[in-house]
Image (spheres, rainbow, N blue to C red):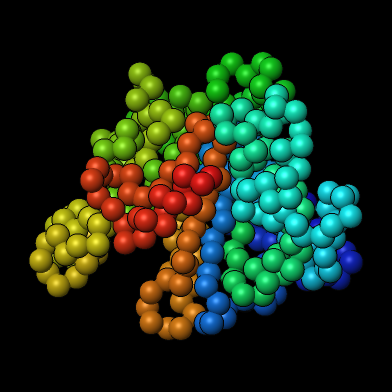
Amino acid sequence: MVATDYEGWYYNHRSPWMKITGNVQGGDYNEFNDDDGNYADRPDVMLVGNHHAREWMSYEVPMFFLETVAYYYGKAGIDNDGDGKIDEDGWDGIDNDGDCLLLNATNQDSNGDGTPCGPGDLGVDEDFSEQFITDMVNTREIYLIPMLNVDGNRYDREEYCGETAWENCRTSGWRKNLRDNTVTGVTPIPDVDEEVDEGCDGVDLNRNYQFEWGAPLGATGPLFPGMCYVDGANNDVYNGPVNYEDNDGDGLVNEDHVDGKDDDADGQVDEDWMGGNTEPETKFIQDMTEMNDDDGDGASDFKATLTWHSFSELVLWPWGHCTDCYTPDDEYLVYHGNMM
């Protein structure tokens, strides 16, 4: 498939879609050619799905969000639950109109979380406000990346597990991207062809970001770039190759890890990193973060970032690399995390 095959081009619609991993099993793509969306007076939010290839629902949710916003944006109030009222049970996790309480007791905890008529139960938040959606879009910059790990997901669905994964996949699925970790003559497993070496290839994108890269998160680090192990140590949480470059030209390597501190006391911060952001997917997120400086003060304008996962049934917030350490926004993160 080439760029001109896309339906948006065929009908002369300008398309905002862009494939971030170049020509990795994906063919050409159409460049982003729309409004850059930079508004200094609006808070920015980034929403990301599918860091992990096997977590298929993690991209369905942001796509449903996109569909909901696109469909209801600008519409007048709609009676979504057919009770003759409009917007009487908005998105707040509360049964504002009592519809849930009208159900018999066995159906009031429909999601099984032990809280009857709470967030996610039938009859709760079923008649939301279309005006709220319109106002949300008009007062924010929303950056939506539904599927970050495109190549890994395609491999999981088409090769590793197949479309009937939940019935017959031999493992829990392919998690990482498709980085080729084998180098003939260097690693124990020679890369004799271009096939994916399932015991070796891939990087856990979730653990590949530069900040506190290699911190004790259960990640697996290599002995040298591209290292792979016969015994499977290069596993589902492999965080990517070590950086052995002298990034700041002082004759030393890895002396100023990305942690927000001047570890080598040279007046610079985080300028000689140990690793991280080695993958096109995580580089894309870094570039998005750094370029999003609407007011030109040198700092990213993202007020919040939410990434969807669907494997461990957890709601996580920072920090995850240390204990008894908190962000300045910890109170808000804890509140919203507990609500979710």
In the displayed structure image, the side of residue 244 where residue 74 appears, left or right? right
Residue farthest to the left?
265
* Residue at the image position 38 percent from the left and 82 percent from the top: 297
Coordinates of residue 187 in the picture (x, y in percent): 34, 30
Coordinates of residue 5 in the picture (x, y in percent): 83, 57
* Residue at the image position 77 percent from the left and 60 percent from the top: 87
Compared to 177, does 209 lie above or below? below
- The answer to whether residue 64 is visible is no
Compared to 337, does 180 lie above or below? above
Q: In this orientation, which residue lies closer to the viewer: 84 or 44?
A: 84
Picture quadrant where residue 230 is located: top left
Coordinates of residue 209 in the picture (x, y in percent): 39, 51
Q: In this orientation, which residue lies closer to the viewer: 232 or 44?
A: 44
In the displayed structure image, the side of residue 138 where residue 102 appears, left or right? right
* Residue at the image position 74 percent from the left and 68 percent from the top: 131
* Residue at the image position 40 percent from the left and 50 percent from the top: 334
